[in-house]
Amino acid sequence: MQISLKKQAARGEALITVLIIAGVICIILFSMLQLSSNSTVNAYGRVDWDKSFYAAENAMVWAAQNAFDNSLAAGSSNYYSTAAGTLPTRDLICSSSTDPAFQGAWVTIVQPANQPANNFQITSSARVNNKVRTLQTQITVRPASSVFDYEYFLNNWGWWWGSTITGNGGQRANWDFDFRGGPTVNGAIYAADQVQDNEIPYQNYSSPPFAGQAGADETNLVHDGAQSVTMPNLLNFSNYMVTAMANTASNGLWLGSTQVVFGVLSNSYTPNPGGNAGNLSPQTGLYAVGTAANPITIKGTVVIPGDLIIQGIIKGQGTLYVGGNLYLANNVSYSNAPNFSALPESQSPTNRDAWVAASQTNDLVAYAVRGSILGGDVTDSSDWYPNCFTMSGSGLQNVGDESHLGADGISGTGDDNTAFLHADGSMSTWYDADGDGTVNGDYNYNNDINMTSSRASYIKGYPKDSNGNPLAYNQLATTDIGMLQGIFYTDHAAAIRLKQSQAYIDGVIVSRNEQIIFQNYLNIIYDSRVNSRYHNNPNNIINLGLPWGKPISVTSFAELAPNHAGL
């Protein structure tokens, strides 16, 4: 019996052990199932979390495009939501028709009253199941191109040759930037390829080929291999015309007290893809001379579909969009200029910003030119013509041909005459440098430049003789130029003859083919009021309506705490 009882007890203990083990296994299995279930739930939650982010981001993109097309009044806001049907679900990454987990999205666009009219704050939220994400961004619609951040910008091979050139500001080239003779550079130098001395990298020399601040601080101020900057394309003026016509009392050109352009010079103009200046129709251009007593006044955005001939005293703040060529017939200077002799870019940042703040009400006029900027008497066969047109290598008769530029768009580089793949699938050596869709050749003097009587007849206000014929251009223009004040932009040629001993360009000069011929000394002084670095103080921004290189720029992006208020 003892033995039997012991065996029975042993069997009982074994049964208890099995039950315990089974219980533990059950607990483990339950925990694993629970963990698996939780993991599945968490996985779905992470997917919902990601989806809500992307839906909110797409709602933000939609809102940015809406702000682009429908600018808000200062200090106002607009609210859109999928629930109200004002935010299209088709523009989101997921929608109620394709993803039942999507619960909705909502977005607010605000134009801060203390910021320029093209600045907006966008806050967007989206919900997928029970996950909500909220994003916020600050954008600028049609921001001024960054080419205006430099006193001298070349969409080509930049070159400063001469010890008597002095630049007070930054300069940049979308290819090499070549220095010879030791010019003075008080500012930064940027080259999309190399900074050079006589086509040899400047680092190969014991001393830099430039003096001034750049020569004294090469490490911080000289930048090889900088990213190329996109040039604004002025082939289509429609956006600028809409702005110009929005309020013709605030957008126009006055000669003395008489307004002669109400937003847009009201005549027809047909661009000519085969030429640099376009086909001119009668009276699409304008002749304007300003004096101290009767200056030319520019306000806001002004569009001249044809050529513009201008000289004398200018006042106001705004941008002239020129569909043909800009002819600078003589000195162009401000009536109420800021103190450029203070050289703002050579000062400390604090003093420079103080100069900007103190100069807010002074004159500031820009010229955005579809054709070319031509300074001096272009009909002068003994001076302008040999210096600006026929000069070996750099004269306009030797530049402008797009047929063999290669993929980098720059003549005289290793890929010239090397075919490359275009977006349409074709192969050729053509590079569309000006974006007009046509292979342009070198500049043609008679078609693109010369001020003939026929060309003059298209220009409103062009002086005539007693018989009603246009005066010869040499009776109106001179090469004896020494002062140009303004912001000058073209993606074609800037060919300017500055014959006075001391020549000044106060502002900005941007072009693709540059042939500026000065006599003894050339001084370029950057107008710090147009530089994008000063946008941190909205009270110091002068919104000139400058050409824009891209439709929208993002200045900040952040995720906020989830906002459930739009549910």
Image: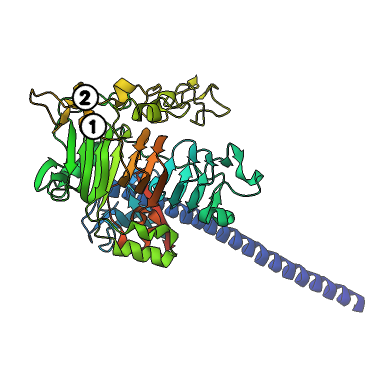
Q: Residue, x 49% and y 20% (percent of image)?
A: 428
Q: Which residue is mark 1?
A: 307
Res. 476 in view: yes
Note whether residue 69 is visible: no
Give the residue type that dot 2 points to.
Answer: Arg
Residue corresponding to mark 2: 455
Q: Is residue 546 left or right of residue 456?
A: right
The foreground one among 551 and 409 is 409
- Looking at marks 1 and 2 on the same chain, the residue that comes earlier in the sequence is marked by 1
- Asked if 140 appears above or below 471 in the picture, the reply is below
Q: Residue flagged by tag 1: what amino acid is it?
A: Asp
- CB under 8 Å between callouts 1 and 2? yes
Residue 388's quadrant in the figure? top left
Furthest residue toward bottom: 2
- Residue drawn at x 31%, y 55% is 119
Q: Where residue 58 appears, x then y in whole percent?
A: 39, 48
Answer above or below: position of 299 versus 380.
below
Q: Secondary structure at mark 1?
A: loop
- Which quadrant is home to the N terminus? bottom right
Cα gap from disc 1 to disc 2, whole angstroms = 9 Å
* Rendering colour mode: rainbow
- Looking at the image, which residue is at 25% across and 33% down? 323
